[in-house]
Image (cartoon, rainbow, N blue to C red):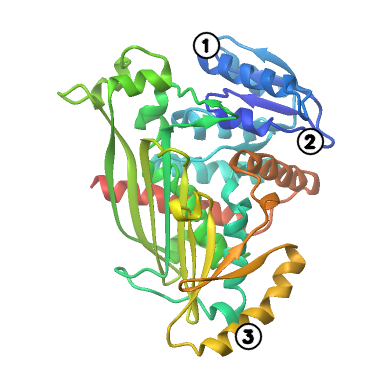
Amino acid sequence: MKLTILDPGHFHAALVQKSMYADVDAAVDVYAPAGADLDDYLRKIDAYNARAQDPTRWRVRAHTGPDYLERFAADRRGGVAVIAGSNARKTEYLTRAVAAGYHTLADKPMAIDAEGFAALEAAFALARERGVLLYDIMTERHEITTILQKGFSRILPVFGTLEAGTYDDPAVTKESVHHFSKLVSGAPVKRPAWFFDTAQQGEGLVDITTHLVDLVQWECFPDEALDYRRDVRVLSARRWPTVITPAQFAQVTGLDRFPDFLRKDVQPDGALHVYANGEIRYALRGVHAKVSVLWNFVAPAGAGDTHYSVMRGTRANLVIRQGARERWQPTLYIEPHPAQDRAAYAAAVAAALPDVQRAYPGIALEPADDGWRVDVPAAYHVGHEAHFAQVATQFLSCVAQGRLPDWEVPNMLAKYWTTTRALALARA
């Protein structure tokens, strides 16, 4: 197989190439406008090739110019397209890719508003017609505590069955906290100015929440195809801005002023308001869920992006925390309901553990205040950046087989309908 990269404006494009892949050509063609985004991508690839430990061997040939998109579609130099950049053109790009016959791996979000969702639905139909696969990069499915949360939720004596919950007391809660200033591949991230423009990047309600909505679907209804027309009810949504000072903007972009396209979001006090935060409350096949995303400028010392997740069962709650007590490492807790017979429940947990350990050797349980902490060997905490290679490997395997699992496409549509419907509701 051969990769073709289209307009790699987001560092996620480079992270797909942080590793080499079996049966994938080291020669890569990149089609993009000349400029800072392309330069930053090329620097990252050069750094991966030059690193001392496990260097990559990518040979990149860049095709620039105003007709880069037309040349990308006409040349079709590779069988697999990777798209990670400004979300304003994401749906246009992936549609052009599948129309040209590329299997397409696209960074999230694939749609940032209702118009984009309609175009995405058409793109999936076109991909089916052309006989190619279209898929988004859902890295969080490969995070070990999320995998274990899903696994324990399928063990009836431990979790029971999933509660339905209510609007005020959801059965599933997921919260993700992100930061504009952070390290990527060991270096301070450089954000393009368009990243702060929700007209191009998309609001928080349709960006990071794609991961959270995806996990709700993946954990609560594994391997089941969802129909957004009947299975999803968005009940409420709200949004609010992160305030970015001119000095903070300069720190992460290298620019000494806000570009003109951001002036619409600059307040009288000179600060930039970015609608990066949001909350969605919805029901999925009758199960109440709440997902929320928060963007701060920089994390506390020693911390990074964090994830919080609760699944409520009839016998226990499964809770992922990633705070100071956990030393900022995602940690899964099993918290049985107080009404349980403690000794009988402990026996049920002990009986279930060997099956988990066969799948993930080294997993252990330690007593915690409200139940047990799931101890995970450090080898399983591979880090967010490594998950991109895991997603890409999985996708390339599907390309080789010629198909995605039957539930993936309907569930991607359910996910993007949920987020874009929530945005319309919040704006209204």
Tell me the crowding category of disc 3: few under 14, some 14 to 19, or many 20 or more residues within 10 angstroms, Cα based.
few
Question: In the displayed structure, would residue 284 be above or below residue 211?
Answer: below
Instruction: Indicate the amino acid at tag 2.
Output: Tyr
- Image coordinates for residue 81, horizontal then vertical, percent: 67, 31
Residue 243: image location, x then y, percent: 27, 32
In three-dimensional space, the C-alpha distance between marks 2 and 1, rounded to whole angstroms, equals: 28 Å
Mark carried by residue 35:
1
Question: Helix or strand or loop: what does disc 1 sit on?
Answer: loop
Q: Please, what is the three-letter code of the amino acid marked with disc 1? A: Gly
Q: Secondary structure at mark 2?
A: loop
Sequence-first disc among 2 and 3: 2
Question: Viewer-proximal residue, 130 or 415?
Answer: 415
Residue that carries the numbered disc 3 in the rendered image? 347
Residue 264 image-quadrant placement: top left
Q: Residue furthest right?
A: 23
51 sits left or right of 107 in the view: right
Q: Is residue 92 visible?
A: no
Decide which of 335, 138 is in the foreground and name it.
335
Q: Position of residue 173 (x, y in %)?
A: 41, 62
Q: Looking at this view, name the residue that lies furthest to the left.
A: 268
Nearer the observer: mark 2 or 3; the answer is 3
